């Protein structure tokens, strides 16, 4: 019985009926509650419905039941990424890759999660400023439409969380109270479902958080200096030798700058003989050997510097420098992809000693060079065509994971084949892996901008993700290259229907909530709403008909207004 329900769920998922897929997988779970595959499948269905919280619960259950199954971590990473937890997603994908290092889905997911984590660190939420300070609570309390929300603890808790971490805003956008509060803070009136459609529970009043008082920091008092000590003759001689060694080092540095490498080596060698407790003399001599192309001697000096540095407990930065220099020598000696492995390992060791940006760049360059050489060594267009044909056969049999495996092998053999990217994008779409499918479709277009199939793949994924404006742009771009393509023309027609539906206000309250929540995660929509000029335009449309009439004559402004209308954020009547 559980297998029958699972089969029905798989069929519904392949057909894009994710609600039914969730229902069938739930029936199967009721009959077989310890089957990890069922929770994994339902997690994928929830993720396709953008219900990432439920997807995360099922992914966690999958990993709990089968901790050594790599796909469970793929589901876990996708759910975390959907919720905006980029760092958690990175951890999940890495855990999966520890078990299955060659899994392409995990590699692709990890790349997306790392990119999302970088974006979140590099570009803070554009709405962050409106949530800062006590002014937020004052505005919400003063506005009659949001004053009632301040008596609801769950709303206050949500706003506290957003104030603490503005990037968490995306988690609460489906709550119409949060949308209304955001409109008040931005001084923009969002179009929203009728009041009776909103879910506003009654609750006891809750006070906004009080600001903690800062305590004055204690003043620091200067420490007394120690009294001078008498030094022995032996100590005095040692100090003189160290001073002489430093002079030799300075002479070596001067010779190095003049490209007089032989003289530099003589000075550094003399410095080493005078003082064997400063490993910088060894690393400097290694740098000279590296410039001269004497890579073996460079490596020997670096190894001595690391060994002596550990004995002396030298500064970890100095040990990292020696390892980085050794890695550079190994890169110079590399002749095939395998030769880069010891260099990469050495750079990684250096980063464990000290995370230096220059070393990190050298590691990334070495990994890229290794990958490029591997591709060159593996390149074979004939085998690539054979693998693509095998993938096509599996696709016809609706065996999409097997088809993906062959398309991936085809791309390893020939990374410049747009057809393989297009076909793999179709497989990902069938499996509900929309981000992976979109990435392949975009790569297909990049490789061959005249290939119409790339635009139909990309447009179909964007349409399925309910990004109708973007899908329309994709289909129209494809028609520039193939004006009579029936798939592209049909795509335009379907997008226009959906956009007009939003323009007429024919969306149900649930559709409107979902569209608004998704739109508010779009950087383009965020930029429009945080643009001071556009915020004034929206106010004029609400309060100043004459100014609004002037705005309608500006194509750029109306284009942005149309994007907000299509997203369900505002409505023009």
Image (cartoon, rainbow, N blue to C red):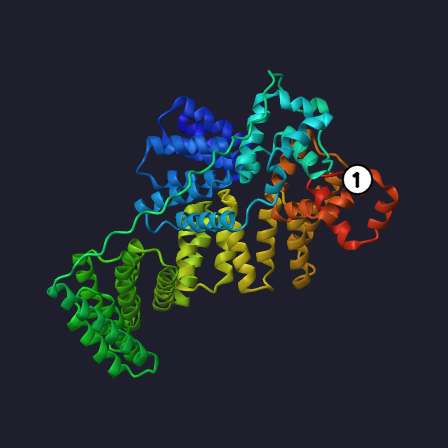
Residue reaching furthest to the right: 546
Residue at (76, 45) in percent of width and height: 536
- In this picture, is 7 found above or below 338? above
Secondary structure category for the residue under label 1: loop
* Quadrant (top left/top right/bottom left/bottom right) for the C terminus: top right
Q: Residues within 10 Å of mark 1 (few under 14, many from 20)?
A: few
State whether residue 531 appears in this view.
yes
Relative image position of residue 129 (x, y in whole percent):
61, 42
* Residue 12 as seen in the image, left or right of residue 141: left
Relative image position of residue 215 (x, y in whole percent):
47, 33
* Quadrant (top left/top right/bottom left/bottom right) for the N terminus: top left
Q: How many marks?
A: 1
Relative image position of residue 69 (x, y in whole percent):
33, 39
Residue 442 falls in image quadrant: bottom right
- Front residue (pair 143, 421): 143
- Front residue (pair 333, 427): 333
Residue at (68, 29) in percent of width and height: 509
* Residue 221 as seen in the image, left or right of residue 275: right
State whether residue 199 appears in this view.
no
Q: Which residue is mark 1?
A: 572
* Residue 215 as seen in the image, left or right of residue 251: right
Residue at (24, 76) in percent of width and height: 248
Relative image position of residue 177 (x, y in whole percent):
65, 28
Residue at (54, 30) in percent of width and height: 20
- Front residue (pair 405, 145): 145
Residue 482 falls in image quadrant: bottom right
- In this picture, is 392 found above or below 217? below
- Front residue (pair 475, 110): 110
């Amino acid at each position: 019985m559980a297998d029958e329900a699972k089969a029905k769920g798989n069929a519904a998922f392949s057909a894009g009926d994710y609600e039914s897929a969730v229902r069938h997988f739930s029936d199967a779970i009721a009959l077989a509650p310890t089957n990890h595959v069922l929770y994994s499948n339902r997690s994928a269905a929830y993720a396709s419905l953008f219900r990432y919280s439920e997807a995360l619960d099922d992914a966690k259950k999958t990993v709990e039941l089968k901790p050594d199954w790599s796909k469970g971590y793929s589901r876990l990473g996708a759910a975390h990424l959907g919720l905006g937890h980029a760092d958690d997603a990175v951890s999940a994908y890495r855990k999966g890759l520890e078990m299955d290092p060659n899994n392409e889905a995990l590699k692709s997911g990890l790349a997306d999660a790392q990119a999302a984590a970088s974006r979140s660190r590099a570009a803070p939420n554009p709405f962050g400023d409106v949530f800062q300070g006590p002014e937020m609570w004052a505005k919400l309390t003063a506005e009659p439409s949001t004053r009632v929300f301040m008596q609801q603890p769950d709303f206050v808790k949500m706003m506290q969380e957003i104030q603490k971490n503005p990037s968490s805003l995306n988690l609460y956008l489906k709550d119409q109270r949060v949308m209304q509060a955001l409109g008040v803070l931005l001084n923009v009136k969002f179009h929203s479902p009728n009041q009776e459609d909103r879910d506003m529970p009654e609750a006891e009043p809750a006070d906004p958080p009080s600001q903690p008082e800062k305590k004055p920091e204690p003043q620091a008092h200067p420490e007394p200096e120690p009294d001078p000590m008498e030094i022995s003759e032996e100590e005095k001689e040692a100090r003189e030798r160290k001073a002489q060694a430093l002079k030799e080092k300075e002479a070596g540095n001067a010779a190095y700058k003049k490209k007089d490498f032989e003289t530099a080596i003589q000075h550094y060698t003399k410095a080493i003989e005078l003082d064997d407790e400063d490993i910088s003399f060894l690393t400097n001599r290694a740098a000279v050997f590296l410039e001269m192309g004497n890579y073996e001697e460079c490596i020997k000096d670096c190894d001595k510097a690391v060994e002596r540095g550990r004995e002396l407990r030298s500064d970890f930065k100095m040990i990292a420098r020696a390892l980085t220099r050794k890695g550079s020598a190994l890169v110079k000696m590399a002749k095939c992809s395998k030769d880069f492995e010891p260099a990469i390992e050495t750079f990684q060791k250096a980063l464990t000693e000290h995370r230096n940006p220059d070393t990190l760049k050298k590691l990334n360059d070495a990994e890229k060079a290794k990958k490029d050489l591997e591709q060159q060594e593996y390149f074979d267009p004939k085998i690539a065509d054979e693998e693509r044909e095998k993938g096509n056969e599996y696709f016809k049999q609706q065996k999409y994971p097997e088809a993906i495996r062959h398309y991936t092998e085809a791309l390893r053999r020939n990374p410049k084949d747009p057809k393989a990217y297009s076909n793999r994008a179709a497989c990902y779409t069938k499996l509900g892996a929309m981000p992976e499918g979109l990435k392949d479709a975009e790569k297909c277009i990049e490789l061959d901008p005249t290939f119409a199939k790339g635009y139909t793949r990309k447009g179909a994924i964007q349409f399925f993700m309910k990004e109708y404006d973007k899908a329309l742009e994709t289909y129209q771009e494809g028609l520039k290259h193939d004006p009579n393509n029936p798939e592209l023309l049909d795509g335009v027609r379907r997008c226009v229907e959906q956009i007009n539906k939003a323009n007429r206000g024919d969306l149900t309250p649930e559709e409107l909530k979902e569209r608004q929540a998704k739109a508010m995660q779009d950087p383009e929509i965020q930029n429009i709403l945080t643009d001071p000029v556009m915020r004034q335009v929206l106010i004029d449309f609400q309060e100043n008909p004459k100014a609004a009439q002037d705005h309608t004559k500006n194509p750029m402004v109306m284009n942005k207004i149309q994007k907000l209308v299509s997203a369900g954020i505002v409505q023009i009547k």
